[in-house]
Image (cartoon, helix red, strand yellow):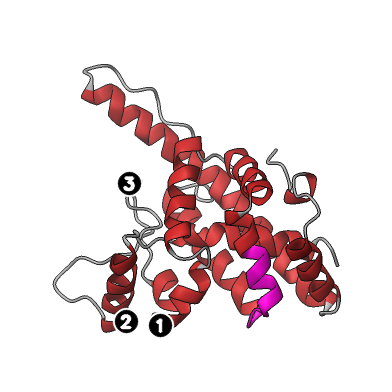
C-alpha cells in the first residue's frame, strides 16, 4: 500500500496555510477531488507493474535471455486503459479544484523543493511503483520549471492540450509523454513543445503527479 502524504509531511507554514484554505472550501468538492486523486494513484500503481515488467523484459531480451511471462491482465488493467484513466483522473482533479490560490501554489512548490516535502513525495512516488531514479529525474525536471509546472503549462496554453495529447498507446516507453510527432502537429502542441524545450524539460503528464498528490492530501484535511 502506498504511504499517504499525511503520514510523511512535517509541519511547515506552506503546509498549514494550504490546509487552512482547503478547510474553507466546499467539502463536497474535496470529496470529488479525493475520489479522482485515488483513481489516479490506483491506475498509476497498476500501470507501473506492467511498465516495469516491459522494461525488464526488453533488457533481458537485449541480453539474449528469455523474458518472463507477462502478468495477467483484463480489460480494466490493460496499459492503454490505465494510461487513459490517469489522464482522465488528472483532468478531473484540476477541473474540480479550479483556479489555485497562491497558498496552494506555495504548498505544491514546497513539496518539490523543501527537503521534508521532497522526502515525503519521494516515499509516496516509490509507494506507487516509480523507481528512485525516475523520481529523481521527475524532481529535476520540475525544478527546471521553478517547482511550479502548473504555472508554466498554463502560460503555454493550459493543461488540456497536454492531457489531450499525452500518449496512451501500447508503447510503455512513450506512455504519458506528449505526442509531438507525425506530419501535422497541432499549434497548441507546438506551443507546449517549445515552452518545455526552452527549459530543457520533456513534456509529460507525470509532471502533474506531485500536484495531484498534494491536492489529494488537502482533500483529506477537510
Q: Which residue is mark 1?
A: 157
Residue 63 visible in the snapshot: yes
Helix, strand, or loop for circle 3?
A: loop
Residue 181: image location, x then y, percent: 20, 65
Q: Is residue 46 above or below residue 31?
A: above
Please name whichever residue, 14 or 78, is drawn nearer the observer in this view of the structure.
14
Please name whichever residue, 129 or 46, is drawn nearer the observer in this view of the structure.
129
Residue at (39% x, 80% y) in the render: 156
Distance between mark 3 and mark 2 Cα atoms = 23 Å
Magenta segment boundaries in residue numbering: 97-108
Q: Which mark is residue 173?
A: 3
Check whether the beta carbons of the residues at disc 1 and disc 3 lie within 8 A of each other. no
Instruction: Decide if residue 138 is on the left or right side of residue 127.
Output: left
Q: Which mark is residue 40?
A: none
Q: Earlier along the polypeptide chain: callout 2 or callout 1?
A: 1
Residue at (40% x, 77% y) in the render: 161
Residue 89: image location, x then y, percent: 58, 65
Residue at (38% x, 53% y) in the render: 175
Distance between mark 2 and mark 1 Cα atoms = 7 Å
Q: Is residue 39 above or below residue 191?
A: above
Helix, strand, or loop for circle 2?
A: helix
**Magenta residues: mostly which secondary structure?**
helix
Q: Earlier along the polypeptide chain: callout 3 or callout 2?
A: 3
Residue at (33% x, 74% y) in the render: 192
**Classed neighbour count for the residue bearing mark 3: other residues with Cα under 10 Å, few (<14), some (14–19), many (≥20):** few
Helix, strand, or loop for circle 1?
A: loop
Q: Which mark is residue 188?
A: 2
Amino acid at each position: 500500500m502506498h504511504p499517504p502524504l499525511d503520514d510523511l509531511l512535517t509541519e511547515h507554514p506552506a503546509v498549514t496555510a494550504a490546509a487552512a484554505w482547503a478547510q474553507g472550501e466546499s467539502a463536497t468538492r474535496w470529496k470529488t477531488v479525493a475520489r479522482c486523486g485515488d483513481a489516479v494513484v490506483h491506475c498509476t500503481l497498476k500501470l507501473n507493474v506492467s511498465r516495469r515488467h516491459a522494461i525488464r523484459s526488453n533488457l533481458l531480451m537485449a541480453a539474449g535471455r528469455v523474458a518472463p511471462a507477462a502478468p495477467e491482465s483484463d480489460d480494466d488493467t490493460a496499459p492503454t486503459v490505465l494510461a487513459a484513466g490517469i489522464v482522465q483522473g488528472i483532468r478531473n482533479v484540476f477541473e474540480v479544484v479550479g483556479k489555485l490560490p497562491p497558498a496552494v501554489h506555495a504548498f505544491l512548490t514546497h513539496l518539490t523543493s523543501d527537503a521534508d516535502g521532497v522526502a515525503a513525495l519521494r516515499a509516496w512516488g516509490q509507494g506507487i511503483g516509480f523507481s528512485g531514479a525516475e523520481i529523481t529525474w521527475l524532481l529535476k525536471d520540475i525544478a527546471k520549471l521553478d517547482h511550479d509546472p502548473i504555472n508554466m503549462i498554463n502560460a503555454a496554453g493550459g493543461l488540456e492540450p497536454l492531457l489531450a495529447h499525452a500518449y496512451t498507446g501500447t508503447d510503455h516507453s512513450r506512455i504519458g509523454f506528449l505526442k509531438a510527432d507525425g506530419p501535422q502537429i497541432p499549434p497548441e502542441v507546438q506551443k507546449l513543445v517549445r515552452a518545455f524545450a526552452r527549459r530543457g524539460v520533456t513534456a509529460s503528464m507525470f509532471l502533474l503527479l506531485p500536484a495531484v498528490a498534494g491536492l489529494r492530501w488537502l482533500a483529506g484535511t477537510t
